[in-house]
Image (cartoon, grey):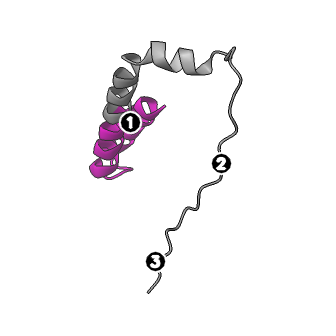
């Protein structure tokens, strides 16, 4: 989607309808998203295992305070 937006912005920028910075920013965003996808490809097995139903009983986690209070 970001790559498509970048190509659209490129056409608009070459016609003077958009500043070139918009096209460059969308291009950088598309490249960054592509890199993130490639990084996640290395972990597909782990992600698939996390999605699979577990056969062991799940222990309910105990609530933990999100803020640590300091007493003075």
What's drawn in magenta, residue-wise?
Answer: 1-30
Left or right of 59: which side holds 12? left
Left or right of 60: which side holds 32? left
Image vertical order of residue 56 relative to residue 6, above or below: above
Residue furthest to the bottom:
72
Q: Which mark is residue 23?
A: none
Image vertical order of residue 65 relative to residue 47, above or below: below
Report which residue position mark 1 lands on. Answer: 6
Q: Quadrant of residue 42?
A: top left
Q: Quadrant of residue 35?
A: top left
Q: Residue 5 colored magenta?
A: yes
How busy is the neighbourhood of tag 3: few (under 14 within 10 Å), some, or many (20 plus)?
few
Instruction: Give coordinates of residue 67: x percent, y percent.
Output: 52, 67
What residue lies at 34% left-to-right and 24% top-to-bottom?
39
Left or right of 54: which side holds 48? left
Closer to the camera in the image, 9 or 57 = 57
Q: Which mark is residue 70?
A: 3
Instruction: Give coordinates of residue 32: x percent, y percent.
Output: 32, 35
How busy is the neighbourhood of tag 2: few (under 14 within 10 Å), some, or many (20 plus)?
few
Q: Which mark is residue 62?
A: 2
Instruction: Give coordinates of residue 13: x percent, y percent.
Output: 33, 44
Q: CA distance from mark 1 to mark 3?
A: 50 Å
Residue furthest to the front:
72
Q: Secondary structure at mark 2?
A: loop
Instruction: Give coordinates of residue 4: x percent, y percent.
Output: 45, 30
């Amino acid at each position: 989607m970001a790559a498509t937006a970048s190509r659209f912005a490129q056409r608009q920028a070459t016609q003077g309808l958009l500043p070139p910075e918009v096209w460059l920013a969308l291009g950088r965003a598309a490249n960054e998203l592509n890199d993130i996808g490639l990084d996640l490809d290395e972990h597909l097995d782990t992600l698939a295992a996390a999605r699979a139903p577990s056969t062991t009983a799940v222990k309910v986690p105990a609530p933990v305070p999100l803020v640590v209070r300091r007493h003075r």
